[in-house]
Image (spheres, grey):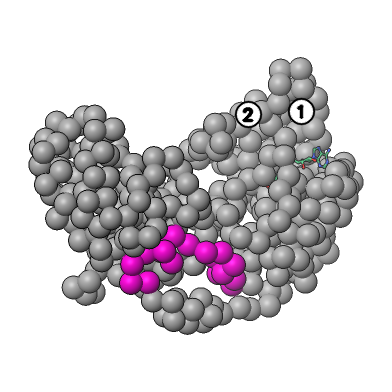
């Protein structure tokens, strides 16, 4: 039930994957968890904002809606932006960056609109304004759509895929938030083993192990909400400290033909606190066999997006991957992430109908997943 201090909270995720984040939000007790374009809407107070940042694996960031008003022209925006209770939200000594997007509105010049909001904050509150992304600056985001101006503050700061305990990163790492979304899309709930035969820095394996262990993804990092006015450090410390953990029955396995990748994965598993339930070994895909114990999920993100000349080599690699999995992994499910539909087809794995394509650092990637292999 809403309390008088409840407000809209928008959980951001890549477009196309909103239903997965909505399901995660619901499982974690957030409501109404309504999927919208580019994210999921929940309601709550600052306690829910903290908890969303701390607990949700699939959200990229958490925005707190702080004001909403009609603005037909810039003078009206100026006047109404000055009435926002900035001092209740922002601190005078923390720099603020304002970002505006306009759509289907009489105010169409985002730069001019940002300048009005910046001036309101500078003159009403006295906080320094920065125009570039600056470390330590709080972001205020305004969206003007159909002449309705909605102002939010970014409570996360650095993108939530930065869990804060991954010292070693490879050449083409998958973001942790994407790994969590794809694991969820494959039906992974923490109760089966996961094998990644081309694990790079170990993102899938570590994310899966953390899910099984019940770790809070944000346990090691700081958040922008800690720099907002009235932040209750004691309440936050209590919430962060209350996280529950279990010791999983399963093991999580990562392989890569590159010894450097295996060293990175091992190091990342140690700093994430899951070294006890993960195993990494240097091994090419041709040597892959299922680990002892029950069948589970193979998650793999083979090389892709290579220059034209290299694509031919990749056909061989995807072909080998497909035949190894079909011959040796009966009873397992497969989730394969790539930007190249042709390469995915080369595996000849029995993929289920395609999910959406997702922007990942400028490349359009997609999860191809199978049911249990015969
Ligand atoms: C796109 S990266 C995986 C990135 C990983 N998902 C992460 O988040 O760090 C692909 C990985 O496949 C590995 N690889 C390429 N050919 C391989 C082979 N034949 N056997 C095993 N690993 C291979 C590469 O060394 C590289 O680490």
Q: Measured along the vertical axis of the image, is residue 181 above or below residue 88?
A: above
Left or right, residue 91 beside residue 212: left
- Quarter, ligand 1: top right
Q: Position of residue 162 (x, y in %)?
A: 58, 54
Question: Is residue 374 visible in the rendered structure shown here?
Answer: no
Q: Quadrant of the N terminus?
A: bottom left
Query: What's the distance in space between the residues labelled 2 and 1, CA to CA?
Result: 10 Å
| Residue indicated by mark 1 | 314
Q: Which mark is residue 340?
A: 2
Q: Position of residue 313 (x, y in %)?
A: 80, 25
Please, which residue is most extreme toward the top here? 309
Corner quadrant of residue 311: top right
Corner quadrant of residue 339: top right
Q: Measured along the vertical axis of the image, is residue 120 above or below residue 233?
A: above
In front here: 97 or 153? 97
Ligand 1 within 8 Å of the CB at mark 2: no
Disc 2 element: loop
Q: Main secondary structure of the magenta part?
A: loop
Q: Residue at x 22, y 71 (%)?
A: 5
Instruction: Write the start and end of the magenta stretch as one range.
Output: 214-231
């Amino acid at each position: 039930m809403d309390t008088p201090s409840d407000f809209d909270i928008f959980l951001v995720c890549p477009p196309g994957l909103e239903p997965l984040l909505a399901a995660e939000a619901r499982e974690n007790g957030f409501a109404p968890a309504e999927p919208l374009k580019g994210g999921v809407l929940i309601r709550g107070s600052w306690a829910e904002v903290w908890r969303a940042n701390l607990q949700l694996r699939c959200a990229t960031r958490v925005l707190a809606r702080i004001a909403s008003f009609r603005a037909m022209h810039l003078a009206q925006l100026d006047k109404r932006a000055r009435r926002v209770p900035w001092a209740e939200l922002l601190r005078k000594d923390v720099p603020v960056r304002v970002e505006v997007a306009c759509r289907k509105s009489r105010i169409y010049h985002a730069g001019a609109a940002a300048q009005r909001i910046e001036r309101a904050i500078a003159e009403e509150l006295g906080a320094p304004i920065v125009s570039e992304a600056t470390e330590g600056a709080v972001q205020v985001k305004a969206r003007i759509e159909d002449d309705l101006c909605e102002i939010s503050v970014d409570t996360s700061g650095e993108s939530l895929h930065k869990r804060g305990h991954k010292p070693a990163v490879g050449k083409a790492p998958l973001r942790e938030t994407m790994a969590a979304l794809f694991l969820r899309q494959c039906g992974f709930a923490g109760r089966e083993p996961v094998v990644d035969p081309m694990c790079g820095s170990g993102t899938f394996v570590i994310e899966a192990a953390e899910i099984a262990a019940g770790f809070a993804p944000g346990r090691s990092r700081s958040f922008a909400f800690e720099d907002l006015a009235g932040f209750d450090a004691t309440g936050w410390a209590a919430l962060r400290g209350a996280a529950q953990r279990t010791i999983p029955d399963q093991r999580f396995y990562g392989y890569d033909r590159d010894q450097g990748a295996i060293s990175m994965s091992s190091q990342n598993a140690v700093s994430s606190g899951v070294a006890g339930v993960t195993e990494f070994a240097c091994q090419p895909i041709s040597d892959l066999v299922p680990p002892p114990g029950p069948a589970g999920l193979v998650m793999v993100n083979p090389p892709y997006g290579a220059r034209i000349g290299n694509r031919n080599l990749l056909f061989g690699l995807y072909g080998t991957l497909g035949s190894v999995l079909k011959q040796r992994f009966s009873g397992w499910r497969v989730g394969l992430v790539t930007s190249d539909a042709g390469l995915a087809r080369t595996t000849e794995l029995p993929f289920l109908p395609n999910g959406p394509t997702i922007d990942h650092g400028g490349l359009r990637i997609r999860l191809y997943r199978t049911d249990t292999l015969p």
